[in-house]
Image (tube, rainbow, N blue to C red):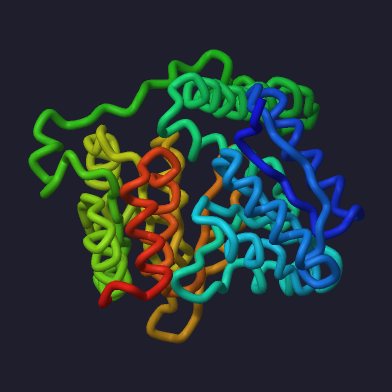
């Protein structure tokens, strides 16, 4: 059996992070392969296992590395398939590895997850595969429910066990609450310009719109339909929820925002589809990379470089190209600079 996912470690010392990924893939029953190869010490080995793995049918690669962390980028050089990068905390809290992995040049994106988040890398890979494999998608959906249930259960296991003179444990006790689902307005679809789009680009602020338009240019070249919506999940919560829920046919969401990156966090709470995050700089020159990429277990955001809307679109093409050779062909031309962008 050909595995669907290949996990590559830059060093054997990264095995603990890989085990987080393998635990998830075992639970989801997705076949995978594990290899150790260094981008710097064994570059020929990286080239061969990635090239031959792609030819054999690997659908998603996960690169796990610390320090300079060039491994995910080296993997991307030899495959048209999506590459997920997991930066590892070896020195400087893993920030050096994070910057190395996420800040890739166009058109070579790495879908970066948080530092040491091998579990989220596996979930993200499963989301990619789930776009054309309904069985995998249903398993991911159940896994997400399990993560949510842990939050509910922690109220009984932790909060209800606290004994202090002024804490009112039975006030709005969680296990007794009726939790209502999200209701979508009947006319919500009328706010969508292209409700049948494959990709939805959600922008949190008007000032971030130029980044979204750059993504749109690339999606046009790849012949991928898309919709762009400017809506803030904080200032316009109902409109934001209505829009995300009404885009029923969307396969991938791209969230673009500065100022705490609430857009991507808002999207992942409302959908089990893959979410790509583009952190932007604001008018003060501050960027929001960490608040985009550092997601908790169960809700990954495939983060690309700061202001790099073009790479977000390329990544969307790589994901959709897993089962669409026409998109892969256009990507090859784009990456070879054979078409005029």
Give the image location of residue 129, x and y in percent: 50, 35
Does residue 281 appear to the left or right of 301 in the view shown?
A: left
Front residue (pair 82, 95): 82
- Residue depicted at x 27% and y 44%: 198
Q: Nearer the viewer, residue 164 or 253?
A: 253
Question: What residue is rendered at 23% in x and 54% in y?
Answer: 223
Residue drawn at x 69%, y 41% as measured from the top left: 119
Drawn side of residue 65 relative to residue 177, left or right = right
Relative height, residue 3 to residue 81 (above, below): above
Residue 169 in view, yes or no: no
Q: Residue at x 74, y 60 (%)?
A: 46
Q: Position of residue 243 (x, y in %)?
A: 23, 43
Residue furthest to the bottom = 284
**Residue 257 falls left or right of residue 26:** left
Query: 189 or 27, which lies in front?
Result: 27
Q: Indicate whether 195 appears above or below 104.
A: above
Q: Is residue 63 left or right of residue 126?
A: right
| Image quarter of residue 32 | top right
The C terminus - image quarter: bottom left
Residue 240 placed where, x, y %?
27, 47
Q: Which quarter of the figure is the N terminus placed in?
A: top right
Whole-percent x and y of residue 328?
Answer: 39, 52
The outermost residue toward the right is 13
Q: Nearer the viewer, residue 295 or 20?
A: 20
From what the image shows, is residue 51 above or below residue 126? below
């Amino acid at each position: 059996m050909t595995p669907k996912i290949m996990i590559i470690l830059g060093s054997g010392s990264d095995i603990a992070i890989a085990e987080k990924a393998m635990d998830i893939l075992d639970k989801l029953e997705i076949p995978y392969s594990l290899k150790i190869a260094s981008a710097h010490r064994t570059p020929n080995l990286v080239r061969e296992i990635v090239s031959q793995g792609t030819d054999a049918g690997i659908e998603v690669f996960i690169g796990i590395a610390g320090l300079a962390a060039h491994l995910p980028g080296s993997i991307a050089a030899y495959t048209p398939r999506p590459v997920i990068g997991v930066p590892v905390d070896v020195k400087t809290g893993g920030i050096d590895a994070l910057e190395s992995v996420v800040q890739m040049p166009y058109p070579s994106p790495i879908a970066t997850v948080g530092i040491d988040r091998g579990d989220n890398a596996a979930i993200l890979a499963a989301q990619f595969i789930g776009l054309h494999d309904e069985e995998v998608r249903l398993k991911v959906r159940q896994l997400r429910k399990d993560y949510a249930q842990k939050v509910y259960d922690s109220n009984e296991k932790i909060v209800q066990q606290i004994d202090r003179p002024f804490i009112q444990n039975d006030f709005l006790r969680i296990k007794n609450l009726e939790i209502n689902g999200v209701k979508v307005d009947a006319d919500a679809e009328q706010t969508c310009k292209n409700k049948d789009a494959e990709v939805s680009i959600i922008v949190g602020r008007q000032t971030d719109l130029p980044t979204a338009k750059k993504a749109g240019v690339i999606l046009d070249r790849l012949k991928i339909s898309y919709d762009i919506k400017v809506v803030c999940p904080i200032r316009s919560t109902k409109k934001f929820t209505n829009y995300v829920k009404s885009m029923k046919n969307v396969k991938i969401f791209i969230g673009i925002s500065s100022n705490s990156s609430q857009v991507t966090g808002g999207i992942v709470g409302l959908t089990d589809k893959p979410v790509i995050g583009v952190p932007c700089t604001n008018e003060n020159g501050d960027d929001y990379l960490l608040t985009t990429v550092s997601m908790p277990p169960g809700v990954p955001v495939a983060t690309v470089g700061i202001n790099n809307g073009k790479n977000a679109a390329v990544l969307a093409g790589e994901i959709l190209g897993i089962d669409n050779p026409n998109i892969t062909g256009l990507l090859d031309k784009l990456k070879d600079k054979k078409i005029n962008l």
